[in-house]
Image (cartoon, rainbow, N blue to C red):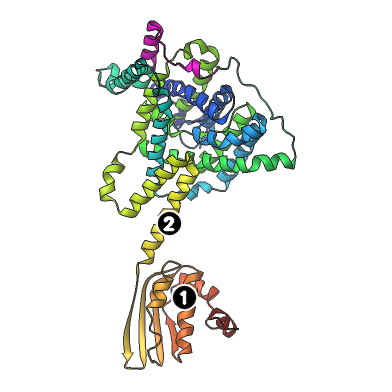
Amino acid sequence: MALFSKHEWFSNIKGDTLSGLVVALALIPEAIAFSIIAGVDPKVGLYASFCIAVIIAFTGGRPGMISAATGAMALLMVTLVREHGLEYLLAATLLTGVFQIIAGYLKLAELMRFVSRSVVTGFVNALAILIFMAQLPELTDVTWHVYAMTAAGLGIIYLFPYLPVIGKSLPSPLVCIVVLTIVYMVSGMDIRTVGDMGELPDTLPVFLWPSVPLNLETLMIILPYALMLCVVGLLESMMTATIVDDLTDTPSDKNRECKGQGMANIGAGLMGGMAGCAMIGQSVINIKSGGRTRLSTLIAGVVLLLMVVFLADWVSQIPMAALVAVMIMVSIGTFSWASIRDLKKHPLSTNIVMLATVAVTVGTHNLAIGVFVGVLLAALFFANKVGNILYIGSTETEAGNRREYQVVGQVFFASSERFMAAFDFKESLERVIIDLSKAHFWDVTAVQALDRVVIKFRREGTEVELVGLSEASATVVDRYAVHNNPEAVEKLMGGH
């Protein structure tokens, strides 16, 4: 894939430029807020967001997706920063990048196939709720001016697009930020602004090698954090890529995205920034504001740095109410409202997976735990469902002497008990034929169940013949079955 494909860079210049500006403005308070969560200086989050956005624009596998410092990652850094300081965080960021590049080469993005649609929906809804909850501190214990500004901001965001001509040419979140900033500067009302969130940096980032001792002890300190950051970063990035794929109806290269995230985090760590990943909220803002190509991500990163360093006085005047309005729009746009309607139509198991993912993610504020619980539940429900697709019938071919069993379905750990229970071992027969032509044996548990059936019949003096094993099942049975090995038979049936 060419680094400078015209389609991936310059097919939507106007839309990408405007959406990049909106994203850059929305990134500033988030980067500062995430720095505060992690317990580091605001510039650590701002430098990280600049570096990650610029590098991922060139190296990522999903055009139009925004990556920067994120809340999910910041939450994992708190203990490391508190106990060991910023330098160890920078070292962990570098190691996170290395792990993510390795994950890309190992094609671990393929594991996303095991994340069901209900888990993705639950993850999206949980993030929408978390984005909304993150705005609540700005809306509690405040004067009526803040509510009025936020309501005005939401009014601009949702009504501006209906204006003829101009409504379609300018992204409404950008208009909201500009208009409310002018109103604030003219009226001089007493409300919180971006400048109140923390001191903005006044210099460009410089190349820094983390000043930590290069020894095994340092590695042992940063290793668990780097692994957690790697997993959460890739999970959120892969999920966000899937969502942006859906929003834009275009495919993306997930393994390239893994490598790109790794390179971006290494770049951030060397420039004094914290680890980050793809941001679902900002990616949705970008797409809904008209961003589609890599140019929007690059502009977002570059404009973010230029605004923070050179226009700090102006940026610090942006009222938080304007950005709260934008983020509320993001949470409303991110939430899958169709999933509420679908609760009636979808099976109970699908609904439980989705709701459990939401509850655990919101409850723990940890994306990885929420997704893990969702995937685990989905796997259990699937195993139970497939385990029930098993039918075993029988016909007596010679009265009192011979019976043929027909096994239809999947035999594995979840259905092995049902498989064994279907046979009558007490029936006095000379010969039993078990037809397995429509059955599939998947694992060692299934083979052990078959062993037990054959051995129990033989102990009753009945001759057993297995017929019709498919090639795939025969491979498993031949490798693990012991019913023709007398010593192993004694061991299996509890003999000594």
Rendered residue at 56%/22% (across/down)? 42
> Exactly how many numbered labels are in the figure?
2
Q: Which mark is residue 292?
A: none
> Extreme top residue here?
186
In-front residue for pair 249/207: 207
Residue 190 located within the stretch drawn in magenta: yes
100 inside magenta stretch: no
Q: Residues within 10 Å of mark 2 (few under 14, many from 20)?
A: some
Q: The magenta stretch spans which residues?
A: 177-198
Question: Is the C terminus in the top left, top right, bottom left or bottom right quadrant?
Answer: bottom right
Q: Quadrant of residue 164?
A: top left
The alpha-carbon separation of the residues under discs 1 and 2 comes to 22 Å
Camera-nearest residue between 178 and 426: 426
Does 324 appear above or below 452? above
Q: Is residue 250 visible?
A: no
Task: Give the answer, above or below, for where 239 lies relative to 490.
Answer: above
Badge 1 element: helix
Residue 336 is situated, as x and y percent measured from the top left of the image, at 33, 39
User: Where's residue 362, x and y in %?
Assistant: 43, 40
Q: Which mark is residue 379?
A: 2
In this rendering, would 166 be left or right of 43? Answer: left
Query: Is 169 displayed left or right of 191 in the figure?
Result: left
Indicate the amino acid at tag 2.
Ala
Residue 374 at x, y percent in the picture: 43, 49
Is 426 positioned to the left or the right of 51 in the image?
left
The amino acid type of the residue labelled 1 equals Ala
Where is mark 1, residue-wise?
Answer: 449
Mark 1, Cα crowd under 10 Å, few <14 / some 14-19 / many 20+, is many
